[in-house]
Amino acid sequence: MYAYHELIYDLIRLDVFQKEMSFFSIGSSYLGQNLFCVKSGMGPKNILVVAGHHSLETILSEVIMEYLFRSKNEWFQGVSFYTVPLLNPDGADIVVGRIKHPRFSSDRSRWQANYRGVDLNHNYDAGFFLAKELVKKDGITAPNHTKYGGEEPFSEPETRAIRDLCKKIPFDVAVALHSQGEEIYYEYDGVVPEGTEQYLNTFRKNSHYTITKPTGTASHGGMKDWFIKTYQKPAFTIEAGLGKNPLPHSLFSKLYADCKVILDSVIETVRNEPKNRDI
Ligand SMILES: [Zn+2]
């Protein structure tokens, strides 16, 4: 399975100079591992793609790296494409057994949270306390392998790194890659930011994934929710693939193909967006 070492190996292999890319760290995980971000292109439109919030879903981290490997430099013309391939390196390392967790060793094979037992995609500041109440009904009130959102929004260094990156760079659109369900979520609490429909039209044209709204505990506290609430710009959660997490590596080619059309669609749409009239 894909974890921190595999990501470092791929970053070295990426040959960023030839690819006209750069990579840097946007912060550190709880255990001090780097939260790497790769930037491709130097255009005025800024795109953020984040994978690996959940440690059983790091096949999408591998997918996004493969996307960078296979993309030609010209493809990123007009955009700056920022990807954070693995936001939860500690969780991923727990799943593969490189990091031993003193309290939760029996949950290793179903570990989705970070080292502190906080589900990063429940830790953003969007309906945080509502999500907390909802998961209470599932009996989740303390650090856990999944769904526990933390004591307060942005209590975790990993989500704070995304928040701070978004403060520095005015992203036009944000995408979070998860598995699974073959679904695309696009709104938060009834809010559909201006420009969202253009993306959905391109997705409808190119992807077979269902465009839908999340329900229950998945409808608050996530990156997409917070991004829409804070910036009123389009943001999407992609639930890639079908099956039980972690998805088997035999699905990699299909996952890659599915995500490629979606990421290509995002780039195509943002590039074609009309410029502000008063400029
Ligand atoms: Zn997920």
Image (spheres, rainbow, N blue to C red):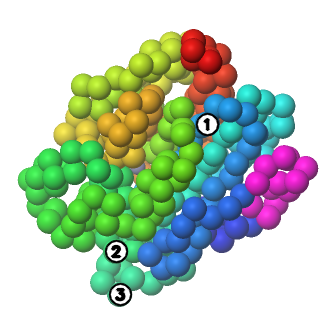
Q: Please tell me which of labels 1 and 3 falls first in the chain.
A: 1
119 over 194 or under it: above or below:
below
Left/right of residue 112 with respect to residue 7 in the rendered view: left
Q: What label sits on residue 46 in the rendered view? A: 1
Q: Residue at x 48, y 79 (%)?
A: 31
Amino acid beneath label 1: Asn
The span from disc 3 to disc 2 (Cα, nearest Å) is 11 Å
> In this orientation, which residue lies closer to the viewer: 211 or 128?
128
Residue range in magenta is: 11-22
> In this orientation, which residue lies closer to the viewer: 140 or 235?
235
Left/right of residue 164 with respect to residue 143 in the rendered view: right
State yes or no: residue 17 in magenta. yes
Q: Position of residue 90 (x, y in %)?
A: 48, 72
Q: Secondary structure at mark 3?
A: loop
Q: Residue at x 75, y 39 (%)?
A: 42
**Residue highlighted by disc 3:** 102
Residue 183 in sight from this viewpoint: no
Q: Position of residue 156 (x, y in %)?
A: 37, 67
The span from disc 2 to disc 1 (Cα, nearest Å) is 31 Å
Q: Position of residue 57 (x, y in %)?
A: 48, 53
Q: What label sits on residue 116 in the rendered view? A: 2
Amino acid beneath label 2: Arg
How crowded pointer 3 is (Cα within 10 Å; few <14, some 14-19, many 20+) is rated as few
How crowded pointer 1 is (Cα within 10 Å; few <14, some 14-19, many 20+) is rated as many
> In this orientation, which residue lies closer to the viewer: 258 or 194?
194
Q: Residue furthest front?
A: 278
Left/right of residue 235 with respect to residue 64 in the rendered view: left
- Of circles 3 and 2, the one toward us is 2
